[in-house]
Amino acid sequence: MTEQEFVIRNKLGLHARPAAILVQKISKFKSSVKIMKENEQVDAKSVMGVLTLAAACGDTIKFIVDGEDEQEVINMLKDLIDNKFYIEYE
């Protein structure tokens, strides 16, 4: 099991579009992935679960990854979050 914290950097936080992108990418992996914000934990393969976190810009979230491809998941998450989910805002 691997745990990694990230700070949400995109301007509008983890709203519907980045949440959908996140779930779509995570769902391709075999590992179990959970997201924690404060004391709430959700399944990262569920759009509704991710949206319930209401993670805003500047919030810290923790990913808990367990499985055979956990390092690949962490690498993908780092790239995705560092690049603000590849969404451009005006």
Image (cartoon, rainbow, N blue to C red):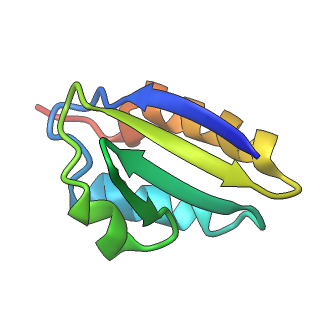
Quadrant where the C terminus sits is top left
Placement of 88 over or under 16, stated as above or below? above
Q: Is residue 41 left or right of residue 76?
A: left
Q: Is residue 68 left or right of residue 16?
A: right
The quarter holding residue 4 reads top right
Query: Toward the viewer: 40 or 54?
Result: 40
Outermost left residue: 90
Q: Is residue 76 left or right of residue 85?
A: right
**Residue 14: image x %, image y %?**
26, 48
**Residue 27: image x %, image y %?**
61, 69
The quarter holding residue 12 reads top left
Q: Could one spot residue 83 in this view of the protein?
A: no
**Residue 74: image x %, image y %?**
67, 38
Q: Could one spot residue 59 in this view of the protein?
A: yes
Q: Residue at x 74, y 55 (%)?
A: 66
Placement of 3 over or under 23, stated as above or below? above
